[in-house]
Image (spheres, helix red, strand yellow):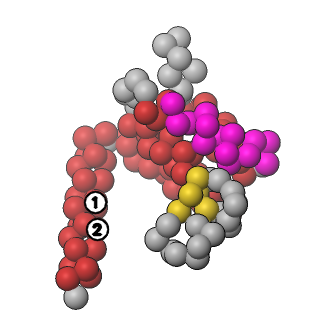
Amino acid sequence: MTTEGLPTRADVEDKWTAIIESRMTREEVHFWAEPLMLGDKIDDMMVASALQYLHGFDLTGDKSGDPFLLNHGPPGEYIRSTDDVAQELERWRAHCGEYDADPVGWAQRARETARQRTEERDQRDRT
């Protein structure tokens, strides 16, 4: 943690690996990440992104069986397996490298990808 009490990349990576290695439960990491995600502005975009992942790794399917209803924590089956969590960590690490090499370009590409996905979703919803 920084002197201001904000998490660093090392902090979020430690929590991420704690889930994968079963050193912490997904719910414990969720409760750690939530106030940080909702609190003070995180200057490092990659830390802010990681907090969102960590906050959501405890999502489970709703006991009603409705695939559109999700809950934080049990009961229910996690929507992401431990392997999924590990793969997301590897993707996040790759994004960190890309971001560090070109922060402005990375942000532009991320916005464009989000715009394209929104358009694709909207088009699917119209059909």
Asked whether 10 falls inside the magenta stretch, the response is: no
Could you give the CA–CA distance between mark 2 and mark 1, rounded to whole angstroms? 5 Å
Q: Amino acid at mark 2?
A: Arg
Question: Quadrant of the image for the C terminus?
Answer: bottom left
The spot of residue 67 in percent (x, y) is 51, 75
Comparing 78 with 43, the one in front is 78
Above or below: residue 57 compared with residue 17 = below
Is residue 103 shown left or right of residue 59? Answer: left
- Mark 1 secondary-structure assignment: helix
Picture mark count: 2
Occupied quadrant, residue 116: bottom left
Mark 2 Cα shell of 10 Å, populated few (<14), some (14-19), many (≥20): few
User: What secondary structure predominates along the stretch shown in magenta?
Assistant: helix
Residue 85 relative to residue 22: left or right: left
Picture residue at 65% right of the left edge, 40% below the top: 29
What residue does disc 1 label? 114
Image quadrant occupied by the N terminus: top right
38 or 10: nearer the viewer: 38
Q: Which residues are magenta?
A: 22-35
Label pair 2/1, CB-CB below 8 angstroms = yes
Residue picked out by circle 2: 117
Residue 81 quadrant: bottom right
